[in-house]
């Protein structure tokens, strides 16, 4: 139940166990072409998608080092541990950072983004996050895109824990570079990362004369798309596994995946509120829910107890939320019964540790959401 790595489907696991094929063959190029088309569907883009053999952080670095020259300026929207990473990467590459920081758990105000762009007209790009998985906040990227659009600056979005589980329309929202990792909603092990690149982003990358990159040179990856194949040896087995998970996602349809995840998220939040617990996020994401521990509860002991007693792995808090909060994912293979089981385990352990919980309250609240959703679906199918 953690926000990555998530469980890997059996068919994808089977592909990981097959003998490795050579990557400079028509067999691999055909598979790679299928993967690229599947990624475009998930990201909702008609433009180029490049595949890197790295973690999501590698794709973040590529989206900085290729885009903003040393001494250039970038606006970074910072709201938690992972959006903070944009700032740290920019600083490492000698980029001047204009920092728009909000308290952990708070969303960004698109009007403030527009104001900063008006003040800092020499900024090259705005760096932000779709789903801040350290706090469970889902940022309004569509509104931020509308704020950035008139400025002519690039919008760069970390969707590592969001793409494939919550609504993300790369082209329609004006996202110029979308960064995604393989180990979350895409349901394969860590090791692949993806960057969707708009034509405007390619023009900016071409204008940077001295890009401090070699392996992460996005222009090299664009050139290889003609084959299509990566310019360097890829994680072949992971690409094969990804083809399987993308087939599953595309057969369901990405918009239906978003609807299903939204229902799981609503049920989880209803259960948490029914138990008298407090959400961290003021604008919750659909991919995970972050929850404060009750005052006085030993958080690390609670997490160990839930896992040892029921086999349910929840994620702890990070940064200033370490020991103060836990996180429940609802992405990938997880379904209604996984959520209900996790809530039941949370209830029982809270009760065992002396927290005054009404047993069954959270399970009932989640079940009502699922029942209502099921009724709505049946009614819709009947016309």
Image (tube, helix red, strand yellow):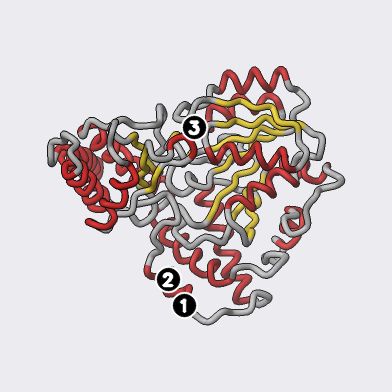
Disc ID at residue 13: 2
Residues at badges 1 and 2 in contact (C-beta under 8 Å)?
yes
**Residue 185 seen in the current view:** no
Residues at badges 3 and 1 in contact (C-beta under 8 Å)?
no
Which residue is label 3 attached to? Answer: 139
* 88 with respect to 261 (left or right): right
Badge 3 crowding class, 10 Å Cα cut-off, few under 14, some 14 to 19, many 20 or more, is many
Instruction: Look at the numbered disc 3 and give the secondary structure of its residue.
Output: loop
Number of numbered discs: 3
* Image: 295 above or below 299: above
Q: Quadrant of residue 363?
A: top left
Q: At 37% from the left edge and 43% from the top edge, which residue is drawn?
A: 327
Badge 1 crowding class, 10 Å Cα cut-off, few under 14, some 14 to 19, many 20 or more, is few
Which residue is label 1 attached to? Answer: 17
Instruction: Look at the numbered disc 1 and give the secondary structure of its residue.
Output: loop
Q: Position of residue 232 (x, y in %)?
A: 71, 67
Q: What separation in Å lies between label 1 and label 2 (alpha carbons)?
A: 7 Å
Instruction: Look at the numbered disc 2 and give the secondary structure of its residue.
Output: helix
* 72 with respect to 286 (left or right): right
Q: What separation in Å lies between label 3 and label 1 (alpha carbons)?
A: 38 Å
| Residue that sits furthest to the left in the current view | 359
| Residue that sits furthest to the bottom in the current view | 19
Q: At 49% from the left edge and 68% from the top edge, which residue is drawn?
A: 241
Viewer-nearest residue: 17 or 344: 344
**Residue 159 seen in the current view:** yes
* Image: 270 above or below 13: above
Q: Position of residue 16 (x, y in %)?
A: 48, 73
Q: What separation in Å lies between label 3 and label 2 (alpha carbons)?
A: 33 Å
Q: Position of residue 146 (x, y in %)?
A: 59, 26
Q: Name the N-terminal-most of marks 3 and 1.
A: 1
Q: At 64% from the left edge and 68% from the top edge, which residue is drawn?
A: 234
Q: Name the N-terminal-most of marks 3 and 2.
A: 2
């Amino acid at each position: 139940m953690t926000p990555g790595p998530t469980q890997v489907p059996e068919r994808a696991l089977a592909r990981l166990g097959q003998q490795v094929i050579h990557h400079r063959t028509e067999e691999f190029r055909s598979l790679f072409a299928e993967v690229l088309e599947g990624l475009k569907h998930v990201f909702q883009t008609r433009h180029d998608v490049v595949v890197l053999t790295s973690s999501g952080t590698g794709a973040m670095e590529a989206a900085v080092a290729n885009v903003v020259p040393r001494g250039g300026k970038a606006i970074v929207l910072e709201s938690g541990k992972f959006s903070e990473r944009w700032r740290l990467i920019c600083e490492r590459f000698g980029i001047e950072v204009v920092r728009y920081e909000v308290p952990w758990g708070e969303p960004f105000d698109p009007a403030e983004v527009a104001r900063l762009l008006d003040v800092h007209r020499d900024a090259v790009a705005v760096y932000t996050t779709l789903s801040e998985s350290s706090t469970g906040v889902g940022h309004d990227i569509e509104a931020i895109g509308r704020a950035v659009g008139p400025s002519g600056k690039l919008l760069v979005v970390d969707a590592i824990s969001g793409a494939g589980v919550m609504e993300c329309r790369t082209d329609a929202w004006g996202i110029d570079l979308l960064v995604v990792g393989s180990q979350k909603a895409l349901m394969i092990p860590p090791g692949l990362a993806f960057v969707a690149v708009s034509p405007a982003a390619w023009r900016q990358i071409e204008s940077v004369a001295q890009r401090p990159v070699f392996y992460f040179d996005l222009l090299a990856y664009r050139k290889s798309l003609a084959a299509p194949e990566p310019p360097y040896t890829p994680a072949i087995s992971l690409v094969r596994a990804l083809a399987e998970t993308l087939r599953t996602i595309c057969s369901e349809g990405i918009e239906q995946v978003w609807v299903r995840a939204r229902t799981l998220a609503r049920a989880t939040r209803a259960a948490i509120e029914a138990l008298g617990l407090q959400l961290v996020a003021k604008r919750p994401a659909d991919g995970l829910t972050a929850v404060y521990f009750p005052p006085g509860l030993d958080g690390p002991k609670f997490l160990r107890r839930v896992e040892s007693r029921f086999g349910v792995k929840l994620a702890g808090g990070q940064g200033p939320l370490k020991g103060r909060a836990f996180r429940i994912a609802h992405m990938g293979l997880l379904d209604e019964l996984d959520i209900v089981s996790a809530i039941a385990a949370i209830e029982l352990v809270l009760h065992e540790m002396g927290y005054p919980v009404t047993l069954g309250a959270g399970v009932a609240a989640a079940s009502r959401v699922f029942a209502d959703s099921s009724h709505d679906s049946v009614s819709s199918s009947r016309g």
